[in-house]
Image (tube, helix red, strand yellow):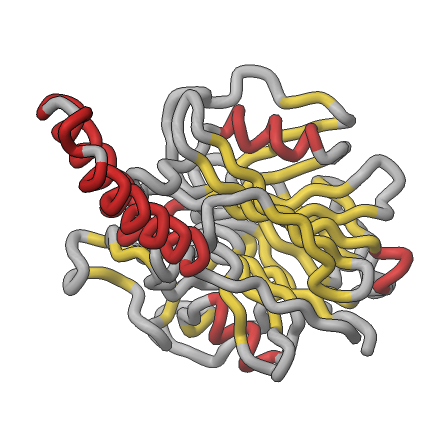
Amino acid sequence: MDFVVIERGNRLPLFIFCSSFLVTIEYMKKMKKRFPVWLWIIFGFLVLLTGVYFIFTLGRPAPVPVKKEVFDGVTYRRVVQYFPHSMIAHVLVIDTRHTKPQFLITPPDEVEDGVLKARTTSQFLEEYGVQIAINGDGFFPWWSRSPVDYYPHVDDPVTPNGLTASQGEVYADGLQNIKPEPTLYISRRNDLTFNRQPSKIFNAISGDRMLVLSGDIVPDLNDTAIHPRTAIGISKNGRWLYLVVIDGRQPFYSTGATFQELAEILKDFDAFFAMSLDGGGSSAMVIEGEYGNTVVLNSPIDSYIPGRQRPVANHFGIFLEP
């Protein structure tokens, strides 16, 4: 299995900016008699804005488009949009014929007042040894009133909102939901189908809503509410699997996406069926790094703290053949 490290942060652009800034200052000193005061003011304002932007984005994935093979048969794409609002999307495109992946939905735990112990997506990847993981369905109980007043913490009991199964055990039936959730079913042979419940459920994970059905974007998706998002999609022949996480709630970096925009991204990647998972502070995408370390591909945000992952209920994980 081959690994590619995705570097975080903007160290090279910051170095270029600082070098260019010093060169420009020296040049302007030599030419100072030719530059009026108002031009110096404009230059200083632009320098300030640029400096704030680079400092703000340090430690996060660089806001530049990327296309890299992170594993054999798995391509990572970073999609960057600036208008009509800033948006950074992280997409894993998985060739299931080439990689022959095996899937894992978070197994149940023996815990009172819930069926799972809350974990971050990174903790899930490390605990179960998968190579790729994203966050899963919404869950209850949950609240986030402040960075110190929130639930769940790691290991707190939680229950997924929708139908959930892992390795043949159905441990959440979705009866607590006001509306039925769409569900992705995964057979023992690792075939993926949406909303067609088999006679014997092996793996299953539910989501918030369908985004793409039979190649068409679902009508009347919300096109105003902008948040971090997570989604999963498959191609028409089932060969290609798409995992999408969009960063959000981070001004000057990535504000997020609407459900309509999320669907359009999946449609652009040729998804034939696609479903959104839990979003907001839950959105996270992680992979196993070159040395067995955990690499967070996106910039999670929980309680408006960039880089902080939220402990969630279940996850969608992938084992790749060595």
The answer to whether 94 is drawn above or below residue 260 in the figure is: below
- Where does residue 114 sit, x and y in percent of width and height? 40, 68
Which of the two residues, 219 or 50, is positioned nearer the viewer here? Answer: 50
- Where does residue 26 sit, x and y in percent of width and height? 25, 46
Q: Residue at x 21, y 32 (%)?
A: 43
Q: Residue at x 33, y 63 (%)?
A: 308
Which of the two residues, 42 or 143, is positioned nearer the viewer here? Answer: 42
Which of the two residues, 26 or 262, is positioned nearer the viewer here? Answer: 26
Residue 273: quadrant of the picture: top right
The answer to whether 170 is drawn above or below residue 130 in the figure is: above
Q: Quadrant of the N terminus?
A: bottom right
Residue 209: quadrant of the picture: top right
Q: Is residue 168 visible?
A: yes
- Where does residue 3 sit, x and y in percent of width and height? 70, 71
Q: Residue at x 80, y 46 (%)?
A: 240
Q: Residue at x 80, y 65 (%)?
A: 72
Q: Residue furthest left?
A: 37
The answer to whether 134 is drawn above or below residue 272 in the figure is: below
Give the left or right position of residue 225, taking residue 143 as reference. right
Which of the two residues, 93 or 314, is positioned nearer the viewer here? Answer: 93
Q: Is residue 139 visible?
A: no
Labels in figure, total: 0
Q: Quadrant of the C terminus?
A: bottom right
- Where does residue 242 sit, x and y in percent of width and height? 70, 46
